[in-house]
């Protein structure tokens, strides 16, 4: 078990799977990491008949099934009796969106079931209503074009969820494609232009849909983050299931899915700005690439759903 007490090297905010294990959770990111203030994530593998417990704290949370189905029993501040919400979940993160549950600050909860589950967090003392978002209501965005095609599930973004600080989404990048591209940043407050947001990338990777690989296969992707005027950071990492990259500042992108392997990441964002908004600035050296997507066909492998993807010929860039 590792409890981080010191800041990462200023040029390296990357954590391999297992390096953030704590209190029965295989991954914990919170303010125990020096210099980390606004976001958190917990990831647990829940065995059949088991559970993952979280005490009431001054954080808002979103429960996100990664693989499997769960029952969440939660007790709101000021209430004596727990409430119950069933999350049908999904087979894996590469099987389309999942239903999610937003819980306000001061809520204790128990997650029961079997599979893997993530809980996104952000400190706040503002209590908003509980929100259950069924998978059928999750906005699915098909972003980019060509080899920059990717699928985004916007269940926890400002347009989809009333939260105080949290902004959460997940991205599927099929094999050989690039996402989080062009490189961009959100580390300074410029009204209407750019937000200040910490960001967590939690990764998973698997053999691409429809392919059969030998047992020796080791799915992976690549992730890049580099310095901006806001701070010194340098991540050029091979990423695997369970790895975490933290972005306190700096330009980040691309995330690249290697040939033969699909890449997934869960993004958790929050920051100190007075409004909850997600505004980015592209790296001027690479922002022009967005203009090249016009007229390109979208990757026909997407969208990934609970069934094999249906070919789409009318997807906008």
Image: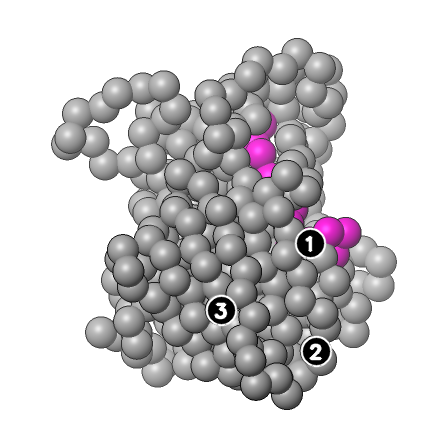
Disc ID at residue 127: 2
Q: Are marks 1 and 3 in contact (CB under 8 Å)?
A: no
Of labels 2 and 3, the one closer to you: 3
Task: Compare marks 2 and 3 and give the one earlier in the sequence.
Answer: 3
Which residue is nearer to you in this view: 305 or 79?
Answer: 79
Q: Which residue occupies 46% across, 21% down?
A: 308
Disc ID at residue 157: 1
Which residue is nearer to you in this view: 150 or 81?
Answer: 81
Residue 155 shown in magenta:
yes
Residue 277: quadrant of the picture: bottom right
Rendered position, 304 above or below 56: above
Of labels 1 and 3, the one closer to you: 3
Q: Distance between the residues labelled 2 and 3?
A: 18 Å
Residue 316: quadrant of the picture: top right
* Boundaries of the magenta span: 149-160
Spot occupied by residue 317 in the image (x, y as percentages of width and height)? 70, 24
Residue labelled with disc 3: 73
Of labels 1 and 2, the one closer to you: 2
Disc ID at residue 287: none
**Res 134 seen here:** yes
Label 2 residue SS:
loop
Q: Which residue occupies 66% across, 67% down?
A: 130
Q: Are marks 1 and 2 in contact (CB under 8 Å)?
A: no
Rendered position, 54 above or below 313: below
């Amino acid at each position: 078990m590792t409890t981080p007490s010191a800041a990462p090297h200023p040029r390296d905010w990357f954590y391999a799977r297992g390096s953030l294990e704590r209190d029965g959770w295989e991954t914990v990111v919170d303010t125990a990491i020096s210099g980390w203030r606004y976001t958190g994530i917990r990831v647990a593998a829940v065995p059949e008949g088991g559970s993952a417990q979280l005490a009431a704290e001054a954080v808002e949370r979103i429960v996100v099934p990664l693989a499997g189905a769960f029952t969440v029993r939660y007790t709101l501040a000021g209430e004596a009796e727990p409430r119950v919400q069933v999350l049908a979940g999904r087979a894996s993160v590469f099987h389309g969106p999942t239903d999610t549950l937003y819980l306000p600050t001061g809520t204790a909860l128990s997650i029961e079931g079997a599979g893997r589950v993530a809980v996104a967090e952000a400190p706040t003392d503002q209590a908003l209503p509980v929100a259950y978002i069924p998978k059928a209501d999750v906005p699915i965005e098909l972003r980019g074009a060509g080899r920059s095609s990717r699928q985004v599930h916007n269940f926890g973004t400002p347009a989809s969820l009333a939260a105080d600080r949290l902004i959460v989404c997940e991205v599927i990048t099929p094999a050989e494609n690039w996402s989080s591209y062009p490189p961009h940043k959100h580390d300074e407050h410029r009204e209407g232009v750019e937000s200040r947001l910490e960001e967590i990338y939690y990764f998973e990777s698997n053999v691409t849909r429809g392919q059969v690989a030998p047992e020796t296969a080791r799915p992976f992707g690549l992730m890049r983050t580099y310095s901006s005027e806001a701070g010194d950071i340098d991540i050029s990492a091979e990423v695997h299931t369970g790895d975490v990259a933290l972005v306190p500042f700096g330009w980040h992108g691309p995330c690249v899915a290697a040939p033969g392997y699909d890449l997934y990441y869960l993004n958790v964002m929050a920051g100190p700005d007075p409004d909850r908004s997600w505004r980015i600035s592209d790296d001027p050296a690479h922002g022009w690439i967005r203009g090249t997507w016009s007229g390109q066909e979208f990757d026909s492998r997407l969208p990934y759903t609970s069934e094999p993807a249906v070919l789409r010929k009318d997807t906008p860039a």
